[in-house]
Image (tube, rainbow, N blue to C red):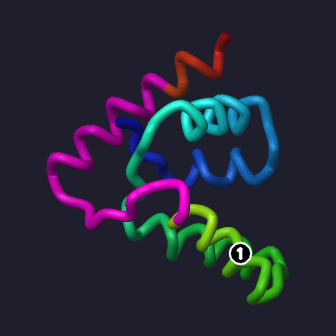
Amino acid sequence: MPVYDTYAWIEYFRGSGKGAVVKRLLESQEGYTPSIVLAEVARKYRREGFGEDDILKRLLFIVSKTEVVTIDIEISLKASEVYLGLLELSKS
């Protein structure tokens, strides 16, 4: 199962080509989001001037689409593996 990092979610919300890869993965299988990603996404959008409601909607979307998990060694290793896989997919 994919592990979605902050970069993946930002690209998804931007609607970029790499975000399209994330969208396809979200539609085809379950995945995980490390809990720290919620804080990082909120920080980014707050820094960019997004309102509280807009930030909350994005965080709730993430929670609704993936299982939010605490980061441990196993998840850290899986995240690095998935990152490389997403990188390869984004090149196609």
Residue positioned 51% across, 71% down in the render: 38
Residue 85 in which image quadrant: top left
Q: Is residue 62 above or below residue 14?
A: below
Secondary structure state at the residue bearing disc 1: helix
**Residue 10 placement (x, y as % from top left):** 67, 53
Looking at the rendered structure, the kind of residue marked 1 is Lys
Q: Is residue 83 left or right of residue 18?
A: left
Closer to the camera in the image, 28 or 7: 28
Q: Is residue 33 magenta?
A: no
- Give the extent of the magenta segment: 64-85
Residue at mark 1: 57
Foreground pick, 86 / 28: 28
Q: Quadrant of residue 78?
A: top left
For residue 83, side relative to residue 79 (left or right): right
What residue is drawn where x is 60% and y is 68%?
Answer: 41
Q: Is residue 80 above or below residue 63?
A: above
Q: How many labels sit on residues?
A: 1
In x, y percent, where is residue 71? 26, 61
